[in-house]
Amino acid sequence: MIIVMRPDALQEDLNKVEEKIKSEGLSYHLSKGSIRTIVGVIGDKKIISGLQMNAFAGVEKTVHITEKYKLVSREFRPEDTIVDVNGAKVGGKHLAVMAGPCAVESREQLMEAAECVKKGGATFLRGGAFKPRTSPYDFQGLAEKGLAMLKEAGEKFDLRVVTEVVNQNDIDMISNYADVLQIGARNMQNFQLLKEVGKTHKPVLLKRGLSATISEWLNAAEYIANEGNYNIILCERGIRTYETFTRNTLDLSAVAAVKELSHLPVIADPSHGTGRWQMVRPMARAAVAAGADGLIIEVHPHPECALSDGDQSLTPKNFEATMAEVKKIAAIMGKE
Amino acid sequence: MIIVMRPDALQEDLNKVEEKIKSEGLSYHLSKGSIRTIVGVIGDKKIISGLQMNAFAGVEKTVHITEKYKLVSREFRPEDTIVDVNGAKVGGKHLAVMAGPCAVESREQLMEAAECVKKGGATFLRGGAFKPRTSPYDFQGLAEKGLAMLKEAGEKFDLRVVTEVVNQNDIDMISNYADVLQIGARNMQNFQLLKEVGKTHKPVLLKRGLSATISEWLNAAEYIANEGNYNIILCERGIRTYETFTRNTLDLSAVAAVKELSHLPVIADPSHGTGRWQMVRPMARAAVAAGADGLIIEVHPHPECALSDGDQSLTPKNFEATMAEVKKIAAIMGKE
Amino acid sequence: MIIVMRPDALQEDLNKVEEKIKSEGLSYHLSKGSIRTIVGVIGDKKIISGLQMNAFAGVEKTVHITEKYKLVSREFRPEDTIVDVNGAKVGGKHLAVMAGPCAVESREQLMEAAECVKKGGATFLRGGAFKPRTSPYDFQGLAEKGLAMLKEAGEKFDLRVVTEVVNQNDIDMISNYADVLQIGARNMQNFQLLKEVGKTHKPVLLKRGLSATISEWLNAAEYIANEGNYNIILCERGIRTYETFTRNTLDLSAVAAVKELSHLPVIADPSHGTGRWQMVRPMARAAVAAGADGLIIEVHPHPECALSDGDQSLTPKNFEATMAEVKKIAAIMGKE
Amino acid sequence: MIIVMRPDALQEDLNKVEEKIKSEGLSYHLSKGSIRTIVGVIGDKKIISGLQMNAFAGVEKTVHITEKYKLVSREFRPEDTIVDVNGAKVGGKHLAVMAGPCAVESREQLMEAAECVKKGGATFLRGGAFKPRTSPYDFQGLAEKGLAMLKEAGEKFDLRVVTEVVNQNDIDMISNYADVLQIGARNMQNFQLLKEVGKTHKPVLLKRGLSATISEWLNAAEYIANEGNYNIILCERGIRTYETFTRNTLDLSAVAAVKELSHLPVIADPSHGTGRWQMVRPMARAAVAAGADGLIIEVHPHPECALSDGDQSLTPKNFEATMAEVKKIAAIMGKE
């Protein structure tokens, strides 16, 4: 931590800052410029991160130099993590394609969707049985009935099942049906839920929060890893900006950033990331070219009848065309 | 809902749109301009909100005209709601002042803080026993021990106790100690938690999410009201923007907006809203002038020793000076 | 500047960094932690700000400690600047109220507006003769004819005239008619225009850019001051965020921040800041309570007939009611 | 335009709205729901866009249905525009690569840079002679001397020259040296400058503003086209968001959006878009995969000595490696 003293700070102010640092068992360097004195604090980063130095008289500002997350960092583990989902790999040379409807609506819809995503080349089936919706009056999902359908479809078409967990008390139950537990954007900082999925050994798909920084996202992953579960797949799904043409702004530079900062695999969600089915194809290509380890795409046999997110769902035909293009990009990227 | 057809939409496309609307039991008006046709859909807004019309061929875009929330809207209830917290009122002519440390750290700290916030004019004591922190390595709170201290301090100084709930399974336990259940910004769309606090009849302090729109915030409140609990106090606590000088951007226009759109009381949090103790005083004044029904302010007897948010905590002396100014503004606003 | 070396940086990398610093005539301190080495660079801040240290091998990141602006900083001049506009003061104990239509549309409209803003207590008349509009097909202003009307109205009602400059070649001409040259949000970083108004000695109203940081805004003011013109009035007019209910998000904490960082007066524009006439009154009160030195408000005798920004314009009657409330807040703030 | 009346609007309010519409020579449809009446206005969109209906009593809100730009829209011209820059094409099947230093610093630097970008496969040389800088104390460029160097380097290595115009009075002079006039992000809504470059027939590179919506960006292009100059190349260069790890957030979905909405070619700037040289390569690949018609990349022979933007400049070696990967993606996209 760097502490910048105000130009009008008194020697007494500086003394109190120094005493505080020493009292915490930390050391420091003073750097006296012609206008300001700067204090560089050295020592245990957990102690440093707890210091409240802006509250001291004479302090202009403090700057944190290092990140708090550790287990998920590239420094901690230089080689890429490959998450094994019952034989289907995510990370490294594997391009994981997860596809399916936003919400499970009926057995027929799901079976039809599963068949076509399998045909298009997906290895994971996505589908929500518990839907976090902005309004209490929107469709909230089929709950356990939907999970049973997912499991059936997954088994029938040899697809791993990815589904969202919104209630910490449902984790065990959902684990009986699903292969990957998804933490949605709205729950990225639901720390209780993170801890609970961390206690399982199930693979977790951790979506980036609507306005989460990359640092906050990796700290959220750290909550999971800190409980002993390293089977974490990060997912960039678009951030909130001022632009209204798209539902969110898919931040593909976050994919490149995660590759630099962390050893965890990262995939992209061009469906939620854009909110417009017309843009899913170009952004799917771009995500893979940026280095993503996979894609999660909404596919619905009849988007115009979808109970949620029909606007951003691909038809089976569009999905196949998208996959054909994605595969060519993946080959260049040395994937699959 | 307004459906805007593309200039190149076919008659057949329009027919399918019309059929879909009719099949849902809704009616519509066609408005044919020289370039585009526009379809205005009329009927039950719950059905309309579920339509996925962008997925239809020939549709350029759709525009939602009405909000989904109802119970919390000014339309539903024109007069202001006044929340009664064991005799302390929030809303109407009452200016509620909630103050105290970010986190409960020890009995001594809390008693000292409670004494000085009471002296400064607060009627509510705030303090966290369960802290949602960005990193798993930051101080997570004293849990039930902290709650017991809050209750003791509240009783001793006749202050109502406000504390955050982060785990749905803790609601009953926390309700034994606290008068107001706080839902923090990170949990504003933790719908499970919203439903659970909705089932109690405890007053709920619902903070606006880090990047929640006013509409999403009111829909979150609707989740609580929809379970039967109308004792909701909204709290503007700053939104996330590109500006880095302040921790968040306190959006006081949201206070004015809520007054227009909803009957619920709304308070402001200038501590989290700015992240800098120097700015709490001017923004506390501004919030009351904008029409806020109260303030929630971090006060710590020794901010430089705080375990969290010392940077934005007022000293007891600063709190008293702030309150003296706030009271003058409140008088002009016809409060207290 | 603080240079943070990567954990895997080589001694050779560090040597090159040190050589570069020395070769620029700067000095430095090394702070070697257990994981990272941190280099604090000391010396002439203009030289430091030009260093491109992230381009060196082994450098993880750099952190700038000090701001580049100087002349407009509170450090440079501790006492408040009071701008004298032909006898009307802005800053210190003076609350400046600038009001009038968004655009000058006709002599009748302007005279009617001027009469009513004078009556309401304004001392400045605002009105655009050159309008920067998003679309080339929107009304672009009456140009010099509009300026002549402004001058006439200003003289008749003893109001100082504020009008926007969008073309550097018009500055001399506009200066013949106006008392204050306004630089609009879209031109805040039109550095050529800033330099040109800096060469005059006319008071300049510098609006904050749509997504300008407070630091960038003060650096824009520095461009003007650096040419010798210190008669600068800053104006917070709302920033761009994800929220769509309001046209912009009026950032009143920026008013408090400017008071801390700079000696220049700062006013607020609740009309553009909210885009909704219903919200002008509460936000005008809040701005003054936050410490603003004045307000700029759109008033139109017949908002429903305005050629631009009718949505956010007050009627004369609303303006009077707003001023009555603002004056009470101003009195508490020790203004006027 | 859709006008949504308030639930409590009076018949008299509605009458006034209808009268206003008729008085402007427009027509309308009424759609009376059980709660609200909605008015759809039909007619000349220039007249509609000037209506200030929110200023009428009883109006809740208005929604604009159509965009104001016309000449640059895909509707107006369905086929892709290909801009011919003295034989070098931008758009269609041509991938344009523009590269070079941020600023022209010396003849040696520029010649070295030009040689290596040519070798790497660029067909355009970029370099700034007039630099818009946040602080007046930062390097402002070599002005006309720099332009002469650019022209010399362009001729020697058969590269078209792209350089920024910041002063409307310099356009003729710069046109003597440069092949493409760049309008930087900060000047995207400097409408005077847009009109002036519109009056020339020089190709214009129009960067997206720091927080410009796609709609505002296309309207800015409309200003140029409206003066008769259709030789416009759009450039996505990153938008301002809350994320601080990258300098800006490169919005590649804007590339896909522009392809849908406009016939103009669009390129991407991964250097400014990320601000970190490490991220230029993945984002260059992603941009081409998203459908960009080209790239503009900062390359400096010695980034650590650059006078500006060294942090985001590629070395010649990195540029070559980047181009090798980009070419493979371009081939898949059917480019060059």
Image (spheres, coloured by chain):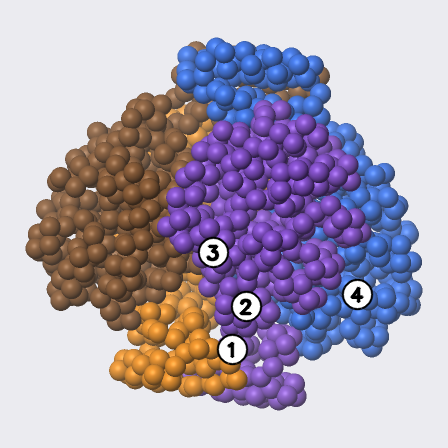
Chain colours: A purple, B blue, C orange, D brown
Reply above or below: B83 against B30.
below
Separation of residues labelled 2 and 1 (CA atoms) = 22 Å
User: Which is more N-terminal, label 3 or label 1?
Assistant: 1
Q: Which chain does the residue under circle 3 lie in?
A: A
State the residue at coordinates (53%, 29%): A315
Front-most of residues B228 and D134 = B228
Dots 2 and 3 on the same chain: yes
Q: Residues within 10 Å of mark 1 (few under 14, many from 20)?
A: many
What residue did someone put label 3 on? A93
User: Which is more N-terminal, label 3 or label 2?
Assistant: 2
Indicate which disc residue A73 carries: 2
> Label 4 amino acid?
Ala
Front-most of residues B39 and C163 = B39
Dots 2 and 1 on the same chain: yes
Which dot, 3 or 4, sits closer to the camera? Answer: 3
- Left or right: residue D320 versus residue C35 is left
State the residue at coordinates (36%, 70%): C54
What residue did someone put label 1 on? A2
Separation of residues labelled 4 and 2 (CA atoms) = 30 Å
Indicate which disc residue B129 carries: 4
Q: Are marks 4 and 2 in contact (CB under 8 Å)?
A: no
Q: Are marks 2 and 3 in contact (CB under 8 Å)?
A: no
- Left or right: residue D256 versus residue B238 is left
